[in-house]
Image (tube, rainbow, N blue to C red):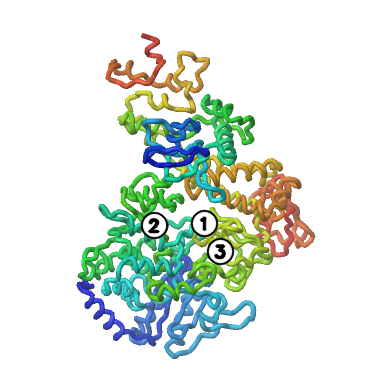
């Protein structure tokens, strides 16, 4: 790759690329993010590559390996361009047929997506309800580019908005104004207006440098939207940070990525290398004298390092624990220099705003501006990443896009915002999504995790799960957070094992208020949310556990027992499945469970075909 | 000078002062546990929380780390602050009931019950010893390890550190087991840790060069 030394050369490269581009050439697009790889997409890619090479089809058909497109439930999937045909859950054997059909401009009807509601096959990706109801500003780019190819990113207009700034010599204040006008709020969870944050950094004294940080330490259980952007579109972050550096006068950038994302780290390193080689990063960018470089720091796997003050300490090489603000990072950040920290999604949105224009972007969404990616997981039919405009009601995300419950029982609640968020019951599903509305409902937007729960989920168990997570992940520096999470877990454990009293609830509420008030950082302050929100909306369940020693969802082991009803045909499947040899019975006779031996693992229930196992 | 209001009283203090220093100077007592003059503020025990700002936007901050701001409204004894303090003391009492410092705090702030499951821990992880060792004794022999419920204080890999001079400053400053150093009065001793520690004057026969905090000390008693 030859380094571009002037703005003119960048222009020439872009014209050359658009002259040689062949947009109508059939392209097989295979998403190969971490989720795709887990479902065996690499085998399919090899099959397609072999087919193309063996039959010498290089000039007739293209293969593009991209990051995740969002529809993880249907992985491994294949998308055909330019027709937009979508094949879900393909296997390596089917690829020959798909290639043949694509070459002939046909469609393999047997492999198409079938809409579960109408029972009809849907050909185009954009007609599938999952995609149709979204507004995909960021995720859409993932389909169009190979994350390992900087030229792919350039071909969709990448880096142009940044280079335009350099060419026009636009005053930095105007760039900040643009971001402010767009109404973008931080996508990491707290929702601080991004433009304002940038202004603070721009105004900070510029003694010996400023830092920009991209916070890619996504640690919420069940959330992976940042991963898909890091893996699928690393250059958009780099461009976002370049624009940020131009606007604020920062000279070094830090990508703080958790080491649990090896593929993301690989793609980011590659992207940094490529943009440096092309002269879009480093010293004297495109001969304009503008300098900005980005280095990468790998997080060692502490959840709390997603908190900005802890992150900064971790970048400095110290133990990742937060400190009290003020001083804010903008006043005193990494190595004492002014520092600005934005989330992955925020940085990736910046080039989109610049391309679209702040006003256009601001028009998207109600209540708050723009779109937000959510990772929709749990007991839902269409698991995946969903990008919707702000102000979309929860119901639309869960039922129209998510397709409703994956099992037989109905949806009971949705947990938003990760361990710091809360559970929102189905009665409130008409709630439009925005930072403030979610906070009012006792939850938070967070980084965008959405865990759907059905009637078989015990809310006490959910609260206990998150509290267990938090008591491990609390850094332990401040006392109310460290001991509060431990004690809260202890109280929840008491309730779920039948030792609870009404005083437990009172004490939990009292403790929650103190943790919220007194904890040092965001982790401790939001830690009681799962407990408070379940107490608010599912108090009956708590009382049922305490007074009647009963778990309505049949989850809390100490409170349930298994028995076999008259549906039993005596097939013996459960006898084989039981790890404790607790089930006895003659063949073709109704079996019975010995409660003394039963460890309540549920293996019999999951194997029984006749619905003969009851949970009491 | 910075002008602020503490509990309705208009005061002015020098720039850079913390709320804790300002309040103490003007005679408003704020309890602390992890704070000690001469050591860097840490803000971990959260006992020193005060309420700042106007309701309903007011919030609680640790006064030992919060620098005074012009026009700041501080309340050191509002209901919210008192409730928070009481709960923190209750939590402390539930974990570390044998500490005299914590017992005194409980008595002073009227905490008469402890509703959690009783634990008997030695350390409340206030970090005073770590900062003492690092900042005053210039040794840096001990530090924090682990996180969350596994957090503890000690030397790396639990091997005695080369930089430790056995000065005893860490034990002297510890609020959780102040009685450690009364080994010569065994009926008052709680953990007896000092009995297992060889005093430097015996080991090295060079007492005067050491900064010794082991007072009263077994070795001195023997002499």
User: What x and y, as percent, mark residue A78?
Assistant: 47, 77
Can you tell which of label 3 and label 2 is closer to the viewer?
2
Would residue A466 appear left or right of A7 to someone viewing this image? right
Judged from this view, the residue extending furthest toward the top is: B223
Which quadrant is home to the N terminus of chain A?
Answer: bottom left
- Which label number is shown at residue A580? none
* Residue on which the image places disc 1: A221
The residue closer to the viewer here, A364 or A296, is: A364
Judged from the image, the secondary structure of the residue bearing numbered disc 1 is: loop
User: What x and y, as percent, mark residue B145?
Assistant: 42, 39
- Which label number is shown at residue A377? 3
Question: To which chain does the residue with label 3 belong?
Answer: A
Neighbours of disc 3 within 10 Å: few (<14), some (14-19), many (20+)? many
The residue closer to the viewer here, A110 or A458, is: A458
Q: Is residue A587 visible in this depiction of the protein?
A: yes
Judged from the image, the secondary structure of the residue bearing numbered disc 2 is: strand
Task: Give the CA separation, mark 2 to mark 1.
Answer: 22 Å
Q: How many marks?
A: 3
Q: Earlier in the sequence, mark 2 or mark 1?
A: 1
Q: Is residue B42 visible in this depiction of the protein?
A: no
Would residue A100 appear left or right of B211 to someone viewing this image? right
User: What x and y, as percent, mark residue A365?
Assistant: 52, 72
């Amino acid at each position: 790759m030859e380094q571009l030394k002037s703005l003119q050369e960048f222009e020439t490269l872009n014209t050359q690329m658009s002259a040689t581009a062949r947009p109508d050439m059939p392209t097989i697009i295979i998403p190969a993010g971490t989720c795709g790889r887990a479902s065996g997409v690499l085998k399919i890619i090899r099959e397609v590559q072999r087919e193309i090479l063996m039959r010498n089809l290089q000039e007739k058909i293209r293969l593009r390996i991209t990051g995740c497109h969002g529809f993880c439930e249907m992985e491994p999937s294949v998308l055909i361009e330019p027709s937009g045909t979508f094949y879900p859950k393909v296997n390596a054997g089917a690829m020959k047929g798909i290639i043949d059909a694509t070459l002939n401009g046909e469609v393999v009807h047997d492999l198409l997506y079938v809409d579960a509601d109408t029972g009809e096959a849907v050909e185009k990706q954009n007609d599938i309800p999952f995609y149709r109801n979204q507004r995909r500003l960021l995720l859409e780019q993932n389909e169009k580019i190979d994350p390992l190819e900087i030229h792919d990113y350039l071909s969709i207009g990448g880096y142009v908005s940044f280079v335009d700034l350099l060419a026009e010599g636009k005053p930095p204040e105007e760039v900040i104004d643009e971001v402010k006008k767009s109404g973008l709020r931080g996508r990491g969870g707290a929702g601080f207006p991004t433009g304002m944050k940038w202004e603070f950094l721009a105004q900070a004294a510029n003694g010996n440098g400023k830092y920009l940080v991209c916070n890619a330490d996504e640690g919420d259980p069940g959330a992976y939207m940042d991963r898909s952007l890091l893996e699928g579109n690393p250059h958009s972050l780099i461009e976002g940070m370049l624009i940020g550096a131009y606007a604020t006068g920062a000279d070094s950038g830090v990508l703080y990525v958790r080491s649990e994302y090896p593929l993301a780290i690989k793609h980011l390193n590659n992207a940094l290398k490529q943009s440096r080689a092309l002269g879009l990063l480093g010293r004297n960018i495109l001969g304009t004298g503008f300098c900005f470089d980005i280095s990468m720091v790998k997080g060692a796997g502490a959840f709390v390092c997603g908190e900005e003050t802890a992150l900064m300490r971790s970048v400095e090489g110290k133990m990742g624990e937060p400190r009290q603000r003020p001083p804010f990072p903008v006043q005193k950040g990494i190595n004492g220099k002014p520092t600005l920290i934005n989330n992955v999604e925020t940085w990736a949105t910046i080039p989109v705003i610049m391309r679209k224009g702040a006003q256009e972007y601001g028009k998207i969404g109600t209540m708050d501006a723009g779109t937000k990616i959510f990772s929709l997981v749990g007991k839902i039919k269409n698991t995946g990443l969903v990008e919707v405009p702000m102000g979309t009601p929860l119901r639309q995300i869960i039922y129209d896009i998510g397709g409703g419950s994956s099992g037989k029982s109905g949806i009971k609640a949705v947990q938003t915002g990760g361990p710091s968020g809360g559970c929102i019951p189905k009665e409130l599903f008409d709630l439009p999504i925005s930072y403030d509305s979610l906070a009012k409902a006792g939850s938070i937007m967070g980084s965008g995790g959405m865990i759907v729960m059905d009637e078989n989920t015990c809310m006490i168990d959910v609260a206990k799960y998150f509290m267990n997570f938090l008591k491990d992940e609390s850094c332990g520096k401040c006392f109310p957070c460290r001991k509060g999470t431990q004690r809260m877990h202890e109280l929840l454990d008491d309730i779920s094992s039948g030792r609870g009293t009404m005083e437990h609830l009172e004490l939990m509420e009292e403790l929650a208020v103190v943790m919220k008030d007194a904890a040092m950082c965001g982790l401790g302050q939001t830690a009681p949310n799962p407990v408070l929100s379940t107490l608010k909306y599912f108090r009956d369940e708590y009382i049922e556990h305490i007074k009647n020693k009963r778990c309505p969802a049949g989850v809390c082991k100490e409170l349930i027992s298994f028995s076999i009803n008259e549906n039993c045909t005596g097939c013996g499947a459960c006898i084989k499945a039981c790890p404790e040899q607790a089930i006895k019975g003659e063949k073709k006779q109704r079996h019975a469970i010995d409660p003394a031996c039963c460890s309540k693992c549920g293996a019999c229930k999951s194997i029984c075909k006749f619905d003969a196992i009851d949970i009491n | 000078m910075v002008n602020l209001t503490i509990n309705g009283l208009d005061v002015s203090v020098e720039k850079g002062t913390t709320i804790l220093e300002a309040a103490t100077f003007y005679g408003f007592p704020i309890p602390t546990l992890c704070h000690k003059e001469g050591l860097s503020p840490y803000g971990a025990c959260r006992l020193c929380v005060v309420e700042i700002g106007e309701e309903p936007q007011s919030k609680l901050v640790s006064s030992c780390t919060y620098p005074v701001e012009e026009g700041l409204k501080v309340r050191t004894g509002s209901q919210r602050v008192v409730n928070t303090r009481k709960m923190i003391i209750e939590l402390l009492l539930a974990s570390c009931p044998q500490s005299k410092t914590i017992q005194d705090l409980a008595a002073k702030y009227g905490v008469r019950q402890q509703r959690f499951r009783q634990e008997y821990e030695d350390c409340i992880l206030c970090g005073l010893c770590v900062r003492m060792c690092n900042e005053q004794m210039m040794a840096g022999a001990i530090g924090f390890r682990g996180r969350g419920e596994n957090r503890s204080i000690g030397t790396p890999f639990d091997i005695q550190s080369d930089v430790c001079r056995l000065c005893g400053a860490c034990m002297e400053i510890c609020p959780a087991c102040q009685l450690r150093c009364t080994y010569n009065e065994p009926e008052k001793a709680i953990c007896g840790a000092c009995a297992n520690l060889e005093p430097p004057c015996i080991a090295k026969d060079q007492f005067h060069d050491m900064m010794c905090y082991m007072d009263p000390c077994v070795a001195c008693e023997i002499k």
